Amino acid sequence: MSTIPYTVRTTDYHTAGEPFRIVHADLPPVPGDTVAERRATALGPGGTGTDPRPGPLDDLRRLLSREPRGHAGMYGGFIVPPDDDGAHFGVLFWHKDGYSTACGHGTMALGAWAVDTGRVPAPDDGTVPVRVDVPSGRVTATVHRAGGRTTAVTFRNVPGRVLAREVPVTTTFGTVRADLADSGAFYVSVAARALGLGVSVPALPDLVRAGREIRAALPGHDVYGVILHEDLPDTPEGPAQRNVTVFADGQIDRSPCGSGTSARLLLLGDDGRIAPGGTLHHESVVGTAFTGRLLAHGITEVTGTTHRTGEHTFLLDPDDTLGAGFLL
């Protein structure tokens, strides 16, 4: 653990229930001219984030995403320089298994954090854009303000596209048809009912098992997350769905998944269920919701709420035999 400091300060948020841990100081240098290049450095020689010779940030990622300081579902971001002066800052998204190319709920949390800390000046009433360079491109978090408080954040994603439709996938629940979309990361969408499942907390063990099997069955597609969804009654503004997104090695997104909501919008638009300008009411397995909007040319926006949960100073005792901790 010699590559990390013994004291690490973080600011933690949750977006619709999903945690996001922001590290903006005490970081070792990460070589690269762009955020994408810095992600490649962070991944290390093997390019997975689990390489035996990891990049300079990996000890810190493990420390903050493992027990007793974190947990298997922890998510966060390392603040790094932007690609150029057009963005306010850059970020490397991380979770227990490595570094993702996109994170919608994290982008919303970063918008609120930038305003809360004064990094980006904001009015008491109105909106302010926070531009962030992420590995998949430049995204914008528009922070909505009223009475001096942040009331919501709208995340505008990078341009997305539908990759494939009706791909047969064999699972222990039967053969299902999967749809693939690139919304900054590659997501697979499968109707939960095709697996004989509903999207609910009691069904989570089976949903996670199905998500793992579907991801493993599509090794050539570089799948980041599997979205298992079900329809809800339409709203006056458009369709409504509930989902659970299984990402990385069987982790569960507590929120409706920001980038995953973008993927659903792209597919629903391809189905003709949402026209440009139309909206999706998208619920999570814990009952929180995002509002997604499909714009033209594969552009999507996702709006939700995000709240600060704490300011932390984590310590690593050099005599602590657990070191970076453990995962259960």
Image (spheres, rainbow, N blue to C red):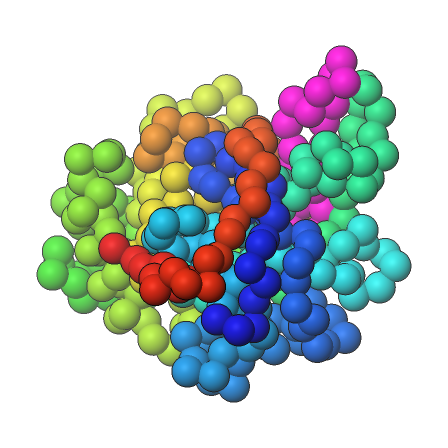
Residue at the location (79% across, 65% down)? 83
Please indicate, yes or no, whether residue 233 appears anywhere in the rendered image.
Answer: yes
Q: Is residue 147 above or below residue 283?
A: above
Residue at the location (59% across, 63% down)? 5
Q: Is residue 133 above or below residue 294?
A: below
Residue 73 x %, y % = 37, 49
Left/right of residue 237 with respect to residue 124 in the rendered view:
left
Residue at the location (43% across, 80% down)? 51
Please indicate, yes or no, whether residue 168 appears anywhere in the rendered image.
Answer: no
Quarter of the picture containing the C terminus is bottom left
Residue at the location (46% across, 58% down)? 317
Residue 152 x %, y % = 64, 27
| Residue lying at the far top of the rendered structure | 147
Give the image quarter of residue 202: top left
Q: Main secondary structure of the magenta part?
A: strand
Left/right of residue 218 with respect to residue 49 in the rendered view:
left
Residue 147 lies within the magenta run: yes
Residue nearest the viewer, comparing 8 with 51: 8
Residue nearest the viewer, comparing 328 with 138: 328
Residue 48 x %, y % = 45, 76
Residue 98 lies within the magenta run: no
Left/right of residue 118 with respect to residue 319 in the rendered view:
right
Residue nearest the viewer, comparing 7 with 285: 7
Residue 258 x %, y % = 52, 44
Q: Is residue 252 above or below residue 101?
A: above
What range of the chain is rendered magenta? Answer: 139-160
| Residue lying at the far right of the rendered structure | 85
